[in-house]
Image (cartoon, helix red, strand yellow):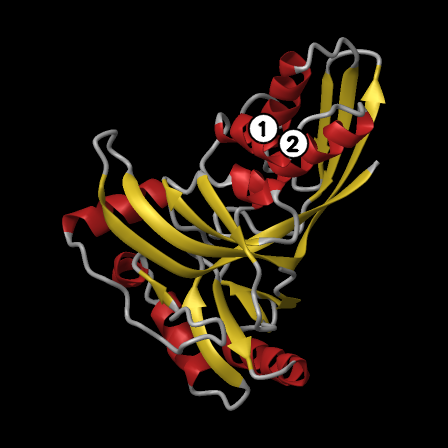
């Protein structure tokens, strides 16, 4: 069984304060995009067999996709095993939720594969045991306001149609480091343009990430000067930067100029918001 595993971007990310459990209270608008990974998931006689095109990723309990399969099989008392093959395209440590999306994709595929009668809400609760971002991906092709640590999901329908260019510098930003740096000097992110749906682009983790990784503010500023671009923002805790363009026709010329300016080997892909 094939299952697409979309990446996500954060159109807003507001940090509301520190929680008693040590995490930060969030309110973020997350949306799935047309770019992501492909998974092939099938029954096997026993156990969990995981393969991945990215040879740097673990193939055991340290991989969220593996853990998702394990928790599903245990929760629903399934005695047979599964094989999972991941064609990995989403950069790692990029603020795009790649690993979380893979885990959700496994849960969604196994629900179909084993014909388990479980609602999205209950599957999302199971996903929440694995990580904060994973429940969002259970609600396929839905935008959502995510609160708490990110695990409280309020799906919504967007009126606007959004597309753009997603780029990655080739290095990651540690999420714990980003939040720790923010906590040492809490500053709201710079407010950007207002979307058709009324949300204003803002990421409160930009200030922390930009203070160390100077490529990120440079790329964002460069994008904001380009005629095709509506606005630009870092996604999640970084290190991906995305633009929203005025229309799809502007994506390819923008991509060509970006690669000419920053290096032809860098990651850059067009995308559509699929919510």
Q: Residue placed at 43% from the left, 87% from the top?
A: 225
Say if residue 187 shows up in the picture: yes
User: Viewer-proximal residue, 205 or 79?
Assistant: 79
Q: Residue placed at 49% from the left, 55% from the top?
A: 30
Q: How many marks?
A: 2
Mark 2 closeness class: few <14, some 14–19, many ≥20 residues within 10 Å: few
Q: Secondary structure at mark 2?
A: loop
Q: Secondary structure at mark 1?
A: helix
Where 166 sits versus 86, above or below? below
Say if residue 63 shows up in the picture: no
User: Viewer-proximal residue, 141 or 96?
Assistant: 141
Q: Where residue 43 sits in the image (x, y, percent)?
A: 83, 22
Q: Which quadrant of the figure contains the N terminus?
A: top right
Q: Residue placed at 15% from the left, 54% from the top?
A: 185
The residue at which mark 2 appears reads as: 119
User: Viewer-proximal residue, 73 or 49?
Assistant: 73
Where 68 sits versus 183, above or below? above
The residue at which mark 1 appears reads as: 122
């Amino acid at each position: 069984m094939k299952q697409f595993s979309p990446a996500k971007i954060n159109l807003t990310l507001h940090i509301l304060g520190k929680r008693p459990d040590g995490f930060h209270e969030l309110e973020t608008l997350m949306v799935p995009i047309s770019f992501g990974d492909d998974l092939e998931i099938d029954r096997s006689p026993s156990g969990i067999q995981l393969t991945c095109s990215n040879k740097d990723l673990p193939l055991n309990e340290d991989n969220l996709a593996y853990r998702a399969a394990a928790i599903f099989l245990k929760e629903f008392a399934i005695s047979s095993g599964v094989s999972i093959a991941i064609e990995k395209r989403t950069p790692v440590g990029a603020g795009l939720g790649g690993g979380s999306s893979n885990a959700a994709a496994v849960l969604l595929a196994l629900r179909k594969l084993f014909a388990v009668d479980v609602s999205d809400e209950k599957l999302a609760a199971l996903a929440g045991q694995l990580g904060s971002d994973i429940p969002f991906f259970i609600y396929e092709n839905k935008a959502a306001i995510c609160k708490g640590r990110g695990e409280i999901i309020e799906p919504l329908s967007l009126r606007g149609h959004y597309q753009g260019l997603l780029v990655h510098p080739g290095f990651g930003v540690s999420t714990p480091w980003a939040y720790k740096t923010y906590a040492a000097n809490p500053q709201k992110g710079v407010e950007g343009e207002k979307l058709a749906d009324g949300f204003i682009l803002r990421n409160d983790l930009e200030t922390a990430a930009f203070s160390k990784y100077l490529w990120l503010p440079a790329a964002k500023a460069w994008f904001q000067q380009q005629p095709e671009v509506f606005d630009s923002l870092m996604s999640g805790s970084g290190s991906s930067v995305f633009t929203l363009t005025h229309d799809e026709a502007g994506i390819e010329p923008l991509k060509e100029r970006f690669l000419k300016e920053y290096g032809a080997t860098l990651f850059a892909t067009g995308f559509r918001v699929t919510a």
